[in-house]
Amino acid sequence: EHAARPARALSGGQQQRLGLARAWALQPDILFLDEPTASLDPGAKNEIEALIEEVAASGVTLVMSTHNLGQAKRLATRVAYLQAGRIVVERPVGPFFEGNDLPPEAAQFLQGELGWSRPPS
């Protein structure tokens, strides 16, 4: 129904879905996503997350930057925490969010974002 509309006339969520579909149509082995749900309403975020899961299920490797820790927990298989352009820690999702032996920078980030109380390392 939107095929004849110019992309600039689409909503933010529709533009994000279009961009993801365009990239996926090229059948890449790896796809880099930079904050793919930033500035979207909750419904559009859910639609983009569902599309991301579909792309991943098709066998495409996704590398995604996000500040949304809930989204990282839901969508990722591995998490890398970067600070000042370097990887501080990189782990599977479970050990990243549930481990007590994170480097102080990553532990502080989790505590600040999620309000977790972690014992000092």
Image (cartoon, grey):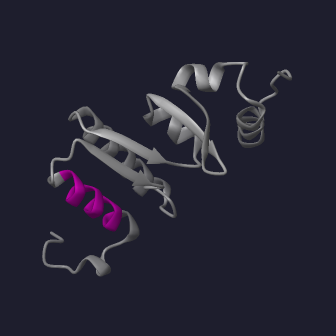
Q: Can residue 44 be seen in this view?
A: yes
Residue range of the region highlighted in magenta in the rendering: 14-24
- 40 lies left or right of 89: left
- 70 lies left or right of 109: left
Give percent across and percent down for residue 89. Answer: 61, 31
Give percent across and percent down for residue 46. Answer: 41, 48
Q: Residue at x 21, y 60 (%)?
A: 22
Q: In this view, does 99 lie above or below 49?
A: above
Question: Dividing the picture into quarters, in which one does residue 23 lie?
Answer: bottom left
Give percent across and percent down for residue 62. Answer: 35, 41
Q: In this view, does 94 lie above or below 116?
A: above
Q: Can residue 73 be seen in this view?
A: no
Q: In this view, does 69 lie above or below 91?
A: below
- Identity of the residue furthest to the front in this view: 86
Q: Quadrant of the N terminus?
A: bottom left
Q: Front-most of 46 and 29?
A: 29
Q: In which quarter of the image is the C terminus?
A: top right
Q: Which residue is drawn at 57% across and 46% down?
A: 68
How many discs mark residues in the rendered view?
0
- 90 lies left or right of 78: right
Q: Residue at x 66, y 51 (%)?
A: 84
- 58 lies left or right of 16: left
SS assignment for the magenta stretch, majority: helix
Give percent across and percent down for residue 105. Answer: 75, 38
Q: In this view, does 87 lie above or below 9?
A: above
Q: Residue at x 44, y 28 (%)?
A: 77
* Residue 33 colored in magenta in the image: no
